[in-house]
Image: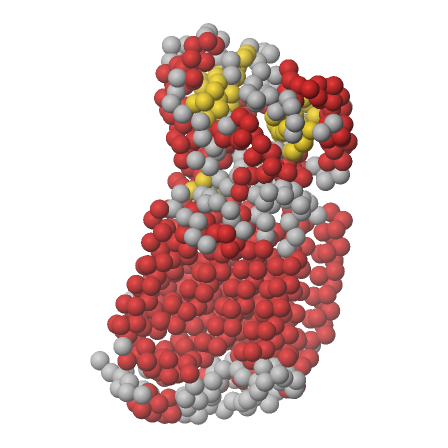
Amino acid sequence: MTDAPQTTPEPDHREAPAGVGRLHRLGRWCARRPWWVITAWLLVLLTALGADRAWGGTYDDDFALPGTAVQTGADLLDAHGSDQVRGTASQIVLHADTGALDAHRDAVGTAMAELKELPEVVSVADPLSTPGAVSTDGTTGIVTVRFAENPTRFETPYLDGVDDAVHGLRADGVDVEYGGPLGQLARPKAEDRLSEVIGLATAVVVLLAGFGSLAAAGLPLLTAVVGLLSGMALLGLLAATFTFGNAAPTLATMMGLGVGIDYALFLITRHRRLLHDVDDPAEAAGRAMATSGRAVIVAAATVALALGGLYASGVTFIGTLGVAAGLTVLVAAAAALTLAPAFLGVTGRRIDRWWVRPPADEPSGTSDTWHRWAATVGRRPWLFLAVGTVVLAVLAIPAASMRLGHVDSGANPTDYTDRRAYDLIADGFGPGTNGQFTIVARLDDTHTDPAALHDALAATPGVAHVTTPVTSKDGALLIATVTPDTGPQEEATSDLMHRLENDTLPDALSDSGAQGYVTGVTAAQLTFRDVVVDRLPVIVTVVVAASFLLLLTVFRSLLVALKAALLNLLSIAAAYGIVVAVFQWGWGGSLFGIDEPVPVESYVPMMMFAIVFGLSMDYEVFLLSRVREAWLHTKDNHLSVATGLAGTARVITCAALIMTSVFLAFLLSSNVVIKMLALGLGVSVVIDATVVRLILVPSTMYLLGRANWWLPRWLDRLLPRLDPEGPTPTATLPRMDVDAVVAAQAASGDSR
């Protein structure tokens, strides 16, 4: 059925529309009182930075899993364990380059005595007097040091005391490396400044190439930086009260910087287009806020909803990562909605005075590249829909073989002390020594034969070694250590943990009535993975449902909201596939500093889903907002899709390039998990801005025709009105020559 175009009278663009909404008034007010707004933001920024410096907290990975067997076992050790199992264990690995470690007995003894004198140290196990702590060739030994608290929470100067304690060993020709939490403390501090500079520099190049104007390039960056610094300072203050993971500041930086530039760019580009028709820059800023500002609010709300949905996992660690990223997104949106109009008020009509190429904003005619592309897609929508779907399906194929796990120290750079400690332990004692399990049997006045428990554990397939079970001081627990045959990243190690939990311990303890638990660092990591796998469908359901309802409420269209959700799921699957191919399969991993294939970190798919879904909705909202604007103006579906695509293609493409550069710049991080997130998020933005936004969205909207905007009346009455601006006044729209667009479509062969 042909959509007949409907022309409308030429609107008066020089008079402020009657009954303007709150966003219009906010934008106009900020533009007319710019120095008030700028001063207020500077005060907020300086106050937040000062407070963060004085009272800000630190970041620490807390994988507490209440209600799980591994957490119950850990709690029992804390309550009843002896000094040999209480606190947090860390390893100091000794390796004699020549001869046996026993030849350095005096230096070892001196070092052990000095380590015991360090603050926070509960116990130190001398390897030369601890069974199984020296390798069979006698060259490598493991010193197990137990700390009252997790060493990752200590200040870096604490390492000076440890270095002093082992100085004699190093002077005696013994290599000393720190493993476990102590090794994490010794890692070089994550330095994201280079990544941030690369992202900002790339943004400048993209903005200058895309829009030409120096002010149009600089204002989004300035707005984004102010918003990012304010958001990060607020996050630091929250970290003093709540526990945020070590990845939180990096993730928050990536999100805050990327969306901050995007949101300001959308507003400023619309403002520059309106300046062609509006004499008063403050009025142009108000009208830009009335349209693109509304899209910014919906986009930021969608991203925040997706990130907030991570709390549905029931895992506090993941939920707080979502809060950290969501906080900087909301602060970035607030900066864009207030600070950007203020800057526009300062520049006035001089915004394009300085340029490196003829300034460009939104197309005003019908002969530009994007109108021609829209017409091409409109002639063969089924073909483009099929091609786009096949491309995403092929990219998603590796995702079917995704194996979740924990990326341990074995994937770190070799200049990290914990990586060298990991390798020394694996070479001297076997790979399973890096992933030992602690077995805890709660006796509860029952009698359990330690020898029988030992024999049952030793006979379990996949077990390399078992220590003799020892009784805690109060007689409440039996405690043993199981060493697997395989390393902590191997699937066989996970299988062994489940075998011990489900078969070996219940069978060995059934006669006595005691309860057995598998705990320890490796068991906690594997349990965390299992919990994440179980909760991922819940996260997907919550995020998709919340985003669907938001889009349905804002755009008043059932099919538009459903289509957006389905297409975003497909693009996320494609991004998963690329991450699996690079990190798990090892395809091109060396290009990103990955020496060997690693499993996908257990929480990466959940984080990627929330972030990618939210960011995909960002571009969806901006495109659909313009399409809906044109639809309300013309009631012509083909014309509306072409106008919306052409009006947003340049700004979405530039925004996507900037966002991609911000994400991919973090591939320079030495943290493998950050690399995973950086690559996954970067390629997802590319996929979304090209295959989805330029091919699949317009082709499906062409095929659906007027059904795009169908909504049952009963549902329309039930849904709340979330439009912060009310009905968009016709006069806020840029000049649109409907007849010219229709003529261009006819000339290109599009008769609809």
Q: Would you say residue 249 is visible in this rendering?
A: yes
Q: Nearer the viewer, residue 517 or 452?
A: 452
Residue 666 percent across, percent down from the top left: 57, 56
Q: Locate the N terminus and report the quarter of the image it occupies.
A: bottom left
Left or right position of 377 against 103? left
Snapshot quadrant of residue 571: bottom left
Left or right position of 693 against 296? left
Q: Nearer the viewer, residue 465 or 233?
A: 465
Q: Residue at x 65, y 29 (%)?
A: 97
Direction front: furthest residue: 98
Taking 534 as reference, is 509 above or below it? above
Q: Would you say residue 86 is visible in this rendering?
A: no
Residue 584 percent across, percent down from the top left: 43, 47
Q: Residue at x 61, y 87 (%)?
A: 280
Residue 142 percent across, percent down from the top left: 61, 25
Q: Residue at x 49, y 82 (%)?
A: 362
Residue 644 percent across, percent down from the top left: 41, 78
Snapshot quadrant of residue 404: top left
